Every structure is written in C-alpha cells, then in structure tokens.
Amino acid sequence: MRIFYTAKLENILEKMELTGWRQKLSEPLTYNEQSMSDNWKLCALGERIKKEGRDLSRVKDLTPDAIKLGFDFAAAVKRRDSTTALAILEQIERLDTIWQNFTESFAT
C-alpha cells in the first residue's frame, strides 16, 4: 500500500510543540511552575520525553545540549522570566534529539 502526503503534512508531523509549557508561560509564573521546572520529568524536557513516549531513568541519557537547555529553562522559570523561558522552550522543540544514544535506543 502506498501512502501519499504533502510536504505540509510532513512539517506538521515533524514539528515538536510543547503546548503544556507554552500555556504555562503565557500566564504569570507562580511557585508551582518554579517547583515543576526543577524536576526533569515535569520540566519542558519532561514534556518532550512524554510526547516521545519514552521515560528518563538517568539525566546522563540526555545530550549535553538538552541538559544545558533544561538547566537554562529551569533558571529562567525560577527568575519568572517568561520571555527567556519561551525562547529556551523553542530551542528544546527544535532539537533533533534529546537522547544521548538515539540510534542505539531504537536498535534494541
């Protein structure tokens, strides 16, 4: 069976959008968001991990870029700087992968 799709559909399928945190950043940040951003599974990276259908057992499983962006995101939320946090969120969305051994994890 052949499946035909347009380039527009391909872009929609490939785009990773972290809508939960986008919604939180559109409103004034509170202590709740600050405490969530301190937890790897609840922060913006955690939302991406969940959307990818995976689970994080060790922070070392993430790429250095993902780890840095995770720390930067948490720091921006702690400062209640929604603008910077949104910019970092967009960088997290654009990462090709957040996983250190991306090819190995799907080969097993």
Image (spheres, rainbow, N blue to C red):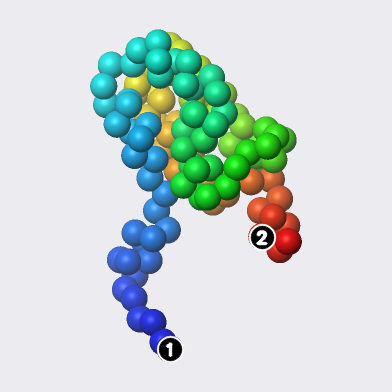
Residue matched to label 1: 1
Residue found at x 43% / y 89% = 1
Per the image, label 1 sits on a secondary structure element best described as: loop
Crowdedness of circle 2 by 10 Å Cα count: few (<14), some, many (20+)?
A: few
From the image, which quarter does the C terminus lie in? bottom right
Q: Amino acid at mark 1?
A: Met
Separation of residues labelled 2 and 1 (CA atoms):
25 Å
Find residue 20 and report its horizontal and vertical position in percent.
35, 35
Find residue 55 and report its horizontal and vertical position in percent.
60, 42
Crowdedness of circle 1 by 10 Å Cα count: few (<14), some, many (20+)?
A: few
Q: Earlier in the sequence, mark 2 or mark 1?
A: 1
Residue found at x 28% / y 16% = 28
Which labelled disc corresponds to residue 106? 2
Foreground pick, 11 / 1: 1
* 63 is higher (above) or lower (below) than 36: below
Please identify the quarter of the rendering in which residue 68 is found: top right
Extreme-bottom residue of the structure: 1
